[in-house]
Amino acid sequence: MRFYLNVDHVATVRQARRTDEPDPVRAAVLAELAGVDGITVHLREDRRHIQDRDVRLLMQIVRTGVNLELAVASDILSLACELRPMQVTVVPENREEITTEGGLDLSGDSKRAEISGAIRSLEDSGIRTALFVDPDEESIRFSAELGVDAVELHTGEYANSWRVKPEEQIKRLSRAAALARKLELAVHAGHGLTYENVSPVAAIHEIEELNIGHSIISRSVLVGMDTAVREMSEILMRVRSKA
Ligand code: PXP
């Protein structure tokens, strides 16, 4: 399983002072040296954390791969086609939200047409494409129809419920992952995953990539990036060696 670190929250600390530290690009280098398989960043339309400069530099410096998260219908799509990261994950964006709140809404024809157009231009630029979706049948079937390479299953609801009632959400994620594989989609997952709750998700064998940010960046403030990344890698390796 690939383990991608989302470094947005390093930029969040920097933007709190609108200064030049801490630098998410430096964090990405440390994370790679500690063994992550890729670096994820979300360039939001409001540029609240990651800036264009970060994405441009990451594209030059990252040696694993960059997974760029973006909302459709934005100038960021053109930037992605210009920079050609290894992967783009299309996510919904809402200005009022604290973080990405749900998967993409693929229910209306106009939304699907918009996403479909974006996927075609990303593919024409040679970029692997993923859609961030809720773990439900309809979203996965729509994603397969749109011809993307992968779905990233939103684990937020599981993360919110794991202390009290994780089984239901794990079953939901497992069913969604199995359907996605049946439809020949690669399966990724992420959002709200922590050292404490990641294991049951990592044990779903169809999932080939996890995107984790906040929990690891939070721990890295206390123990350093190297230790924070290695501790997560150890959990993932332990789970997968049993699965
Ligand atoms: N995957 C997607 C699509 C996201 O939008 C985010 C948050 O930016 C993550 C994964 C990582 O979530 P977290 O920071 O809660 O680990």
Image (tube, grey):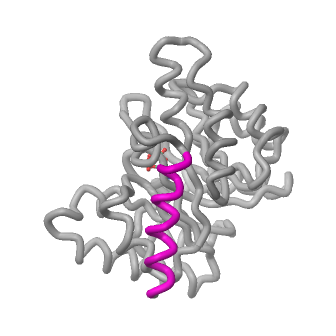
Residue at x-position 60% and y-position 42%: 41
Against 4, residue 22 (above or below) is above
> Is 239 contained in the magenta span?
yes
Instruction: Measuring from the top left, give residue 222's x and y in whole percent.
Output: 39, 37
Instruction: Measuring from the top left, give residue 135's x and y in whole percent.
Output: 41, 69
Against 231, residue 50 (above or below) is above
Q: Which residues are magenta?
A: 226-242
> Is 98 contained in the magenta span?
no
Residue at x-position 62% and y-position 47%: 31
Quarter of the image where the N terminus is located: bottom right
Q: Is residue 119 left or right of residue 231?
A: right
Against 147, residue 219 (above or below) is above
Against 171, residue 106 (above or below) is above
Residue at x-position 43% and y-position 35%: 221
Res 211 visible: yes
Instruction: Measuring from the top left, give residue 139's x and y in whole percent.
Output: 47, 67
In depth, the one of 146 and 223 nearer the eye is 223
Task: Decide whether the magenta segment is chiefly helix, strand or loop.
Answer: helix
Residue at x-position 38% and y-position 65%: 198
Res 110 visible: no
Instruction: Measuring from the top left, give residue 181's x and y in whole percent.
Output: 57, 83
Q: How many marks?
A: 0
Q: Quadrant of residue 123?
A: bottom right
